[in-house]
Image (cartoon, rainbow, N blue to C red):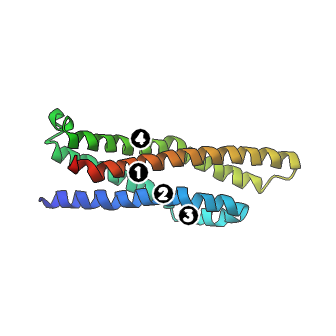
Amino acid sequence: MHALTIFARFVHVGAGGYWVGAVLFINAFLGPSIEAIGPESRGLVRELMRRRYFEMTMLMATLTILSGLYLVWLDSDGFRAAWFGTRFGFTLTIGMAATVLAFVVAIVAVRPALARVMAIGQQMTDVTSRGERHEAVGALEAARARLSAAGAFAALLLVLAVATMAVARYL
């Protein structure tokens, strides 16, 4: 096996493992914990932002997709249509589509919802009247619901991608 192929496979598996693990951790543990703790969790979220946890996750997603495309290009002999018609090729294509869709969901839904939650949380520290606070809490709950739904959908897509890549060779 060529050194570049080995490197691409290492990047694909390593970055993909990080991405899927981070998304599952965020959705199953971190997000619900932050929500349960409430305003006191702002320091934790701020620290995660300072350390660029979410940007690192998106970098790993990008590396996963790019290295995966390179590996498919190699395996399919330059994206030859006949390869995609095989069970192996078709199954990997489903996984690739799920992966790319999860990436798109992260960009167009998760990221804006997270930014909205952060902005509303910051605004809530400045709210003085009871009416403003009630309005801010409602907006925060709506943004959290969007964030949770988008995150769960992205996680489901990534689990599908992992499953297809795990079994494709055996179909």
Q: How many marks?
A: 4
Asked if the residue at tag 1 contacts the one at tag 2, i.e. Cβ–Cβ closer than 8 Å, the answer is: yes
- At horizontal 68% and vertical 61% (from top left) the residue drawn is 36
**Seen in the image, is 121 located left or right of residue 68?**
right
Q: CA distance from mark 4 to mark 2?
A: 16 Å
Choose mark 3 or mark 4, whichever is in front: 4
Name above or below for residue 6 compared with residue 146: below
Name above or below for residue 132 compared with residue 28: above
Say which mark, if any, is on residue 34: none
- At horizontal 35% and vertical 40% (from top left) the residue drawn is 97
Three-letter amino acid code of the residue under disc 1: Val
* Mark 4 secondary-structure assignment: helix
Depth check: give the residue in front, 149 or 40.
149
> Which of the two labelled residues, at mark 2 and mark 1, occupies the earlier sequence position?
2
Q: Position of residue 100 (x, y in %)?
A: 38, 43
Say which mark, if any, is on residue 159: 1
> Which of the two labelled residues, at mark 4 and mark 2, occupies the earlier sequence position?
2
Q: CA distance from mark 2 to mark 3?
A: 16 Å
Asked if the residue at tag 4 contacts the one at tag 1, i.e. Cβ–Cβ closer than 8 Å, the answer is: no
